[in-house]
Image (spheres, rainbow, N blue to C red):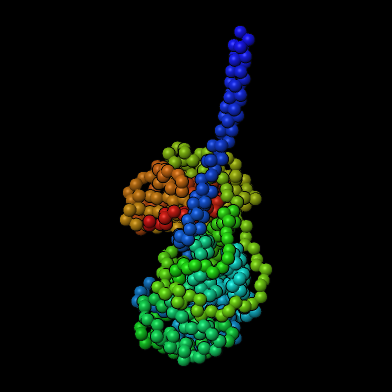
Amino acid sequence: MNGNRGGLTGFFRKGTALLAVFLLLWGSFPAMLSAESKASPSSAANQLYQSLSSGKRISVPAAPGVASPGGDDASESQEGGKVVYLTFDDGPSKLTPQVLDILQREQVKATFFELGELAEQRPQLTKRVVAEGHALGNHSYDHVYKELYGSFEGFWNQITRTEAIFYRIAGLRPELVRPPGGSYTNFDSFYFYLLEQGGYRVFDWNVDSTDASRRGVPAEAIERAVLGAPLKDRMVVLMHDGAGHEESVKALPAVIRHFKENGYRFDRLDAAPESVQFRLGKVKWQRALGFGAFEKLLAEAAEHRTLLVREPSGGAAGPAGVVTTAKGEETAGQGKTPENGNTSQAVKAAEPVKPAAGLSAGTDALLTGTNTEVRPAEGSIAVPPAGGLNRSAGLAAVSGSAGPAPEPGKLTVRVNGKSWTFTDGEYELDGGRFTVPLSAVARMLGGVYTAGPDGERLQIGLTRLTLAAGGSSVAVEFPGEKTASYPLVKSAVQAGGERRIALRTAIELAGGSITGYALNGTGGIVDAECPVRLVQCANLAPGA
């Protein structure tokens, strides 16, 4: 009897212990689910990190371009034919005015990859480069290799510091970047991806004038190097206008004459449809980039990408194509001076924007057509109150008497503080719902819009929206998640074939939210917040 009692006691003790363990696990299960549900963005970033660590090149859709300060020159690339892009590195210097005089006399355009350190010393020359219609490119701050290639952070800080200098001097933020010494054996996959993620276009060259292969290269040798290069449809010529390159100035007229006689036209590099880049080689620098630092740099680069969209750039961005030179090993590393200059404390780039909330609670109802974009109170004229638009929950109209009233026939959309204005005909207000073109949504949210026979696509950060031709729903793709399809409340076809989409639908599906609004007749003001998202990382570029 005592034995049975002892057995029962042991059984209950074991049972109690098992029950305690079960309850403990059950109590932590929701937290585990919550943690797992939040992990998908990091999982996507980790997948990207692993791919780049293996040496794989991953392309990034080009950031939407803005108007070129050079006028109509950037559009010349549409003419086709043979094109030569003259590029000058390491200026500005006392030789730069002579180069500009020759270019002006010959009536050709070129690209100047300047150092921030020297632009600070000779700002009037940087201004003249832009004023005379040439493209301005970023060549780092001080050309010191160990600072640039010891870590990506060092390179990024020098590029963004120089960009700030250009913006202060000339009022533009060039998207063109040329690595000192070229990318071969200096760049790895992380450098290319993060710079492209930041909205930059990296350019090497496919014709080396050899004017910096050693000191005092005579003009005749420079001419032989350029004139002897095999002729291609697109020639990107490396030359220098930095100190000590007097012979390059002497050789320039002969170089220009050579290409004119062979039927080439001259253009700015920001008009080039594709980047010319060396292939990846074994990096000669000892460096490492941890996953935590990579995530931070991704966010910083993504925020910078939106900055290039908001502010003037050096010219319109082309497609994200890349041409790798066949002889990168032989040409890379040539044509560059030894590392020099003083190491300077780089200016830290701006902190990334904190992500806003995702889909609002009313999204499901909105997508199925039971909700409207905005709903003004009956008989009232909505006016935004002082201090901004209404941020309360629900869809009631904004009330108040202070602040500017929306203009009838005009829609103003403010995304993360940046304003976009649409006039009558560029948007519709139907049933209290604003609809705008898909391409306009791309511009506002820093995305990429493409259209083809099969439909239209909108790549906004990691999110891709697809509207099939003739369809009445939108497909939403996000890494690590199943493709979801939602019916559209409104999708009208414009005269040009491009469809409009409800503004709230597009912003919320991209992960943003409407934070305020006001109506006045057919006009309105809409405030929205959209988080900076990472560009799709797994072969989901537009058109893929």
Q: Nearer the viewer, residue 331 or 377?
A: 331
Quadrant for residue 30, please give it. Answer: top right
In the visual, does 331 lie left or right of 12? left
Quadrant for residue 121, please give it. Answer: bottom right
Q: How many marks?
A: 0
Residue 125 visible to an observer of this rendering: yes
| 226 vs 353: above or below | below
Residue at position x 43%, y 47% in the image: 476
Q: Nearer the viewer, residue 75 or 425?
A: 75
Residue 219 is situated, as x and y percent measured from the top left of the image, at 49, 90
Residue 290 is situated, as x and y percent measured from the top left of the image, at 58, 56
Residue at position x 49%, y 51% in the image: 47
Residue at position x 60%, y 48% in the image: 389
Q: Nearer the viewer, residue 457 or 499?
A: 457
| 399 vs 453: above or below | above
| 248 vs 83: above or below | below
Residue at position x 46%, y 40% in the image: 366
Quadrant of the image for the C terminus? bottom left
Q: Nearer the viewer, residue 347 or 415?
A: 347
Residue 430 is situated, as x and y percent measured from the top left of the image, at 43, 46
Residue 489 visible to an observer of this rendering: no
In the visual, does 538 lie left or right of 122? left
Residue 247 is situated, as x and y percent measured from the top left of the image, at 52, 89
Quadrant of the image for the N terminus? top right
Q: Of all residues shown, which one is farthest toward the right? A: 345
